[in-house]
Image (tube, helix red, strand yellow):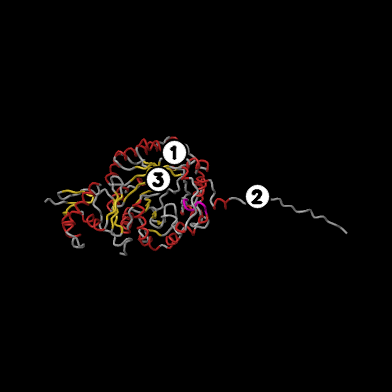
Amino acid sequence: MSGLMQELSAKALTLGVPMSVQLDLTYRCNERCVHCYLDHDDHGEMTTAEIKHLLDEMAEAGVFMLTLSGGEIFLRKDFFEILEHARRLTFCIKLKTNAIMIHEREAARIRDLGVESIQISIYSHRPEVHDAITLVPGSLKRSLDAIRFLSSQGLKVIIANVLMVQNMQDYEGVRALADELGVESTLDPTVTPMMDGDRSTLNLGVDNTALQRLFRNESLVGNVEEFCAVPPRPGEDELQSLPCSAGHTACYVSPYGDFYPCVQFPLTCGNVRQQRFVDIWRNSEQLKEVRSIRVKDLSSCSQCTHVTNCTRCPGLAYMEGNMRGPSTQDCEKSYARTGIPSVNLQLKKPSVKNLIQIRMQPAVVAVSA
Amino acid sequence: MSRLYVARNTRVAARNLDGEMMIMSGKDSTLFTLNKTATIIWQSADGATPLDEIVERRICQEYEVDPAAALQDAETLARELAAHGILDVSENPIVSTKLQPVNSQPPKSPAGESR
């Protein structure tokens, strides 16, 4: 984050302003990515009028950064009507899409509407790998065509790659592809549980050996020694700091109007169909609880070696059962980085003392007098 | 002397944070913030009102300032913002046929007020 953005975020935090919101317009999708955390059925999405009204309320509340995501946003027939309304309200807009419905005409319209950036999921440079993840034959070609259309309009495109067992060998190829296309790329080794709590998708995540290799790749992390160093012990300032911006300057709204602190933190704080956006933001008891948590309050993390530079996600911790607890996937990342297991990982290890037990009951010998 | 007209570029993103405008350039994602007086000029830049009139009505009446110096500062600001593509400047009134903001006014309070 740039210095100026940090300054503005700090000001927004002090003033209680929700600087950034992710709004998912639909959970419907035209791909079926194997690692996706969503149920793609439509359970009653907000109407065009409801979304426009919500956008009005968000602008009034001071929201500046607006991410429109899904599901696949272009499946909504009213997508451009919503986007146009959002731009009239002068939001800074980022789109997240698989882009397979974007052609020259759509790209030109996105440019005309002044969208800040478009993030597009690409899992491999090889069609047989990418398409096996999206489960849509030809999807890589269509997404790449769209990237070219958008780039030719001068738009900022960011390729987002999620590292999994299926595409573990291909991240260098995706980066080379991004370079060739002249766009940015990001790589995330975190596979998240389904929103309904089903954790089976986590089996797709890469193992510790792969993470170690990733974290020692200078072209990805910069200075490896620095990146993998054991962090210093936390000072009082660090223990009093906030664990994450979720619920503090950022929040999430689902296609059904449910309000969460973050897309990865499915703690229902209210519903924008029943309450004003700003009233939920200000008065939700759930948000107040999230906001009350400081690093010192985290049950095992506050005692952990990694506390000052861990990527702990409070949403993933919540999905593990405790918003003040650890997010094990981030413990695993800290372990892969430094070679030192987190407090949480140490607690999860079975105790060696009782690993092998032999119980014996002496035979009862009848003694007769 | 010719008059200068200024209009907010429709491709930028903007939001008022406690009286100071945050602006993201649509051209290269550069982030800007404007102080309170620059924000007043930004909000008044409708393409139809000449800059000297904006300065006279919105700045000089609210702040203790020399009108000539204020106008000079405003012109410098306008040309600087124009160089970054976030304000359009012309010697003639500017009519934009593209997106018009639904409401260019700042929120009533940092987090909005009850209706």
* x and y, in percent, of residue A281 in the image: 38, 60
* x and y, in percent, of residue B80 in the image: 23, 49
Q: CA distance from mark 2 to mark 3?
A: 48 Å
Q: Which numbered disc, 2 or 3, marks the residue that appears first in the sequence?
A: 3
- The magenta-colored residue range is A304-309
What residue lies at 44% left-to-right and 54% top-to-bottom?
A265
In the displayed orientation, state which residue is furthest to the right: A369
The residue to which callout 3 is attached is: A29
Residue A124: which quarter of the image? top left
- Label 2 in the same subunit as label 3: yes
The residue to which callout 1 is attached is: A171
Q: CA distance from mark 3 to mark 1?
A: 24 Å
Q: Which numbered disc, 3 or 1, marks the residue that appears first in the sequence?
A: 3
Q: Is residue A77 above or below residue B69?
A: above
Q: Which disc, if any, is residue A355?
A: 2
Q: Nearer the viewer, mark 3 or mark 1?
A: 1
Q: Chain of mark 1?
A: A
* x and y, in percent, of residue A152 in the image: 30, 38
Residue A274: which quarter of the image? bottom left
What residue lies at 12% left-to-right and 50% top-to-bottom?
B2
- The amino acid at mark 1 is Tyr
Q: CA distance from mark 1 to mark 2?
A: 40 Å
Residue B83 colored in magenta in the image: no
> SS at mark 3?
loop
> SS at mark 2?
loop
Q: Which residue is more in the foreground, A23 or B2?
A: B2
Q: Chain of mark 2?
A: A
Q: Main secondary structure of the magenta part?
A: loop
Q: Which disc, if any, is residue A163?
A: none
